[in-house]
Image (cartoon, helix red, strand yellow):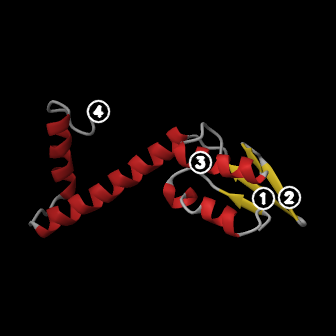
Amino acid sequence: MHKCMSPHGDFDHVGEAINLVNNFKVENVIFNCGPYNDLEQDLIKVLDKKKIKYYSCIKELNIDKNKLYFLQTDIEDEKRLYRRNQARKGNYNLNKTAVNSGVKDLARFHNAGYKGLYNGETADDI
């Protein structure tokens, strides 16, 4: 394995990286930008011990005749996208429950929700 890359240091992306490094020949590891979390720091200790080079915040990588470009995101971008996705799922479930409960006018239903959240102001007022 020439390169091992991780978009972020959460377990779903880095959790088995130490196992990979210990059981396969890895030449380089590439981290995303930002501070290293505990999992990444543990991996870095293994990389240092095995003298495997690692990099972060690279913009592009040449692989044979191809270029791989990296989007530079920070943890705040990831958090915002996660929250947006959670809100989308919540709204979907809310709509489904409202329809199953007999709500016929979803626009009026949601507007009533805005009024409850924002001291009587409607979505148009906000």
User: Which label sits in the foreground, 2 or 4?
Assistant: 2
Query: Do the CB atoms of the residues marked 2 and 3 lie less than 8 Å apart?
Result: no
The answer to whether the residue labelled 1 contacts the one labelled 2, judged by CB atoms less than 8 Å apart, is: yes
Secondary structure at badge 2 equals strand
Residue drawn at (45%, 43%), measured in percent from left and top? 80
Q: Give the camera-side residue of 121 and 116.
A: 116
Which residue was labeled with disc 3?
42
Q: Which residue was labeled with disc 4? A: 126
Q: Is residue 106 above or below residue 117?
A: below
Q: Circle 4 — which element?
A: loop
Using residue 110 as the reference point, say whether residue 88 is left or right of it.
Answer: right
Contact flag, marks 3 and 1 (Cβ < 8 Å): no
Q: Nearer the viewer, residue 23 or 6?
A: 23
Q: Circle 3 — which element?
A: helix
Q: Amino acid at mark 3?
A: Asp
Work out which residue is located at the far top of the displayed protein and give it.
Answer: 119
Callout 2 crowding tier (Cα within 10 Å): few <14, some 14–19, many ≥20: few
Amino acid on which the number 2 mark rests in the picture? Asn
- Whole-angstrom CA distance, mark 1 to mark 2, is 6 Å
Residue 87, can we see it?
yes
Report x, y in % for residue 22.
67, 64
Residue at mark 1: 68
Q: Are marks 1 and 4 in contact (CB under 8 Å)?
A: no
Q: Residue type at mark 1: give it.
A: Leu
Q: CA distance from mark 2 to mark 4?
A: 48 Å
Q: Element type at marker 1?
A: strand
